[in-house]
Amino acid sequence: MTSGTYIQEGFNRAGKVTTQAGRDLRSNPDPKARSKAGKTLRSLQTHPGVQRVAGGGRGAVAQGLGRGLLVGGIAFTAWSNYNSTGGDIPLTVAETAFDTGVVMGATHVGATLGAAIGTAITPGVGTVVGSAIGGAAGAVTGILMTGPVNNFMSNTWEGVKGWFD
């Protein structure tokens, strides 16, 4: 996966947090929850750095770049797996699907946890920063997790392939 994917995931998490804050501000009966939601939204409205970064992620160019980086990351992973498997297409497809799913899932979980921790520390700015840091940490964790599983898949592939002959 690419860093663009991780950054996009961070922005997606931050967007969900601010959407929830808007809902809480309008309809949550708990005054503490409404107060926290108001602080989150005010910090995003008043912080110039957050506005500048958030505005850049909404443009068609930025979104196209994020999608392009995602596709490029998957293509790079597939090429790397193709080379490491000696050109075995079914094994390459299996490893690439596994790699992509694990890294995207770990990035999502990391961004969610980072956003929650960042919001608890500093609503608004902490949400964005925590989500980006958590997403990056989750992605690195996912990448590290895929290596041993891919090795196992490669080592057992010949035996599994024999089942279908």
Image (tube, grey):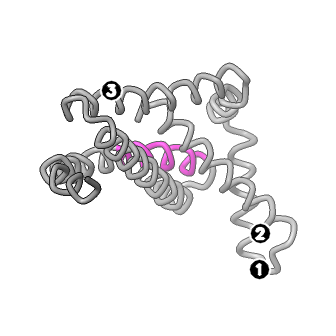
User: Badges 2 and 1: C-beta atoms under 8 Å apart?
Assistant: yes
Q: Nearer the viewer, residue 47 or 27?
A: 27
Name the one closer to the observer, 27 or 9: 9
Kindly identify the residue that appears in the image at 67 percent across and 37 percent down.
Answer: 47
Mark 3 vs mark 2: in front: 3
> Who comes first in sequence, dot 3 or dot 2?
2
Looking at this view, name the residue that lies furthest to the left.
155
Q: Mark 2 points at which residue?
A: 34
Amino acid type, mark 1: Asp
What's the CA distance linking mark 3 and mark 2? 49 Å
Decide: is 60 above or below 130: above
Q: Which amino acid does label 2 sit on?
A: Arg
Q: Judging from the image, what secondary structure is the residue with disc 3 in?
A: helix
Q: Give the range drawn in magenta.
A: 125-139
Q: Where is residue 93 in the image (x, y as percent from the top left)?
A: 37, 41
Residue 34 vs residue 95: left or right? Answer: right
Q: Residue 69: percent from the left, percent from the top?
A: 50, 26
Which type of secondary structure does the marked residue at label 1 adopt? loop
The residue that label 1 is drawn on is: 30
Tell whether 87 sits left or right of 133.
left
Residue position for label 3: 79
Taking the view exactly as shown, the residue that stands out farthest to the top is 61
| Mark 1 surroundings within 10 Å by alpha-carbon count, few (fewer than 14), some (14 through 19), many (20 or more) | few
The reply to whether discs 3 and 2 touch (Cβ–Cβ < 8 Å) is no
